[in-house]
Image (tube, helix red, strand yellow):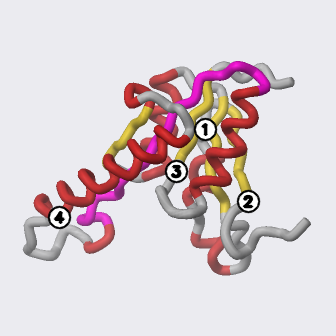
């Protein structure tokens, strides 16, 4: 039995999000915890740098609208009401920490691809969330690197 009261599930809205949410939902069912979802959209300027003389605002708005629709559908599958579904713009690890503190989460549930070698040295969202979190973090193994039982 866990003592968790508020869990925040960090999702990228890919197929890997379902096992992360399933694990969090199982924990919440055991403890009666409140579930929240967060999806972080990285600004296109982070990916392309600030030196490109283009206005990304229209594209960024479209990305936000599509993500909002996907998050709504995803949240409905897990019975998470709209007021506990959060879409934010920024660096994932920073925004996940911030939202977790804002809502008083005592557990962050995030997917991890179990990277190794150079990919591990370069970092990942799960690694960034783990370091600097003010609450517990559960990294759920997802993707191709998942171990078989």
Q: CA distance from mark 3 to mark 4?
A: 21 Å
Q: Are marks 3 and 4 in contact (CB under 8 Å)?
A: no
Q: Position of residue 143 (x, y in %)?
A: 67, 69
Q: Which residue is at 47% across, 40% downward?
A: 75
Q: Nearer the viewer, residue 20 or 115?
A: 20
Regarding mark 4 in the picture, which secondary structure is present there?
Answer: helix
Write the start and end of the magenta stretch as one range.
30-46
- The disc label shown at residue 44, or none: none
Label 2 – label 3 distance at C-alpha = 13 Å
Residue 146 lies within the magenta run: no
Q: Is residue 75 above or below residue 145?
A: above
Q: Are marks 2 and 3 in contact (CB under 8 Å)?
A: no
Q: Earlier in the sequence, mark 1 or mark 2?
A: 1
Q: Position of residue 14 (x, y in %)?
A: 51, 62
For marks 1 and 4, the one nearer the N-term is 4
In front: mark 1 or mark 4?
4
Q: Where is residue 144, by image quadrant?
A: bottom right
Q: Which secondary structure lies at badge 1? A: loop
Indicate which disc residue 59 carries.
4
How far apart, in angstroms, are the residues tagged by discs 1 and 4?
Answer: 31 Å
Q: Which residue is mark 1?
A: 133
Q: Position of residue 54 (x, y in %)?
A: 9, 72
Mark 2 and mark 3 lie on one chain; the one further toward the N terminus is 3
Marking on residue 141: 2
Spot occupied by residue 11 in the image (x, y as percentages of width and height): 52, 51
Q: Which residue is mark 3?
A: 11
């Amino acid at each position: 039995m866990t003592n968790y009261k508020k869990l925040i599930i960090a999702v990228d809205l890919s197929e890997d999000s379902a096992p992360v949410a399933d694990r969090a939902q199982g924990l919440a069912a055991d403890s009666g915890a409140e579930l929240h979802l967060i999806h972080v959209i990285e600004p296109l300027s982070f990916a392309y740098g600030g030196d490109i003389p283009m206005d990304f605002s229209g594209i960024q708005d479209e990305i936000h609208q599509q993500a909002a629709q996907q998050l709504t559908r995803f949240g409905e599958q897990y019975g998470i009401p709209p007021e506990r579904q959060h879409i934010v713009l920024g660096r994932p690890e920073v925004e996940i920490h911030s939202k977790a503190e804002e809502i008083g989460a005592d557990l962050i549930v995030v997917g991890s691809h179990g990277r190794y070698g150079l990919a591990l040295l370069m970092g990942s969202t799960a690694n960034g969330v783990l370091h600097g979190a003010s609450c517990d973090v559960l990294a759920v193994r997802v993707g191709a690197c998942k171990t078989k039982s």
